[in-house]
Amino acid sequence: MNCRTEVEAAMFEMIKRLQQHGWTPAEVALALADAAEDYVMLLASKNAGSH
């Protein structure tokens, strides 16, 4: 299995779990996308500071 496959499997499990708390799949997907973007920006800023 590659990283993307494992991430997608975890994401689908997370969506299923969070639906039980009342969130729609779209709400969860948008929150995941926002969080992923924030994390990418954090990683980029850490890498820029190390050069």
Image (cartoon, rainbow, N blue to C red):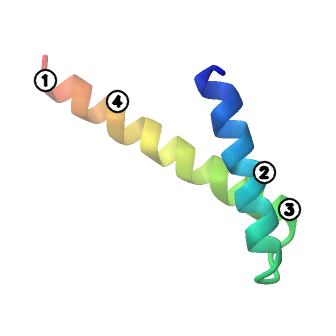
Is disc 4 surrounded by few (<14), some (14 to 19) or many (20+) residues within 10 Å? Answer: few
Q: Secondary structure at mark 4?
A: helix
Is disc 3 surrounded by few (<14), some (14 to 19) or many (20+) residues within 10 Å? Answer: some
User: Mark 3, mark 2: which one is toward the viewer?
Assistant: 2
Which residue is label 1 attached to? 50
Q: CA distance from mark 1 to mark 3?
A: 37 Å
Question: The residue under label 1 is which amino acid type?
Answer: Ser
User: Mark 2, mark 4: which one is toward the viewer?
Assistant: 2
Q: What is the number of the mark on residue 12?
A: 2
Which residue is label 4 attached to? 44
User: Mark 1, mark 2: which one is toward the viewer?
Assistant: 2
Question: The residue under label 2 is which amino acid type?
Answer: Phe
Q: Name the side, left or right, on which 40 lies relative to 3.
A: left
Q: CA distance from mark 4 to mark 3?
A: 28 Å
In the image, residue 19 sits, relative to residue 14, either above or below, namely: below
Which residue is label 3 attached to? 25
Q: Position of residue 36 (x, y in %)?
A: 55, 44
Identified at 74% across, 72% down, the residue is 18
Q: CA distance from mark 3 to mark 2?
A: 9 Å
Q: CA distance from mark 1 to mark 4?
A: 10 Å
Q: Position of residue 50 (x, y in %)?
A: 13, 23
**What is the quadrant of the C terminus in the image?**
top left
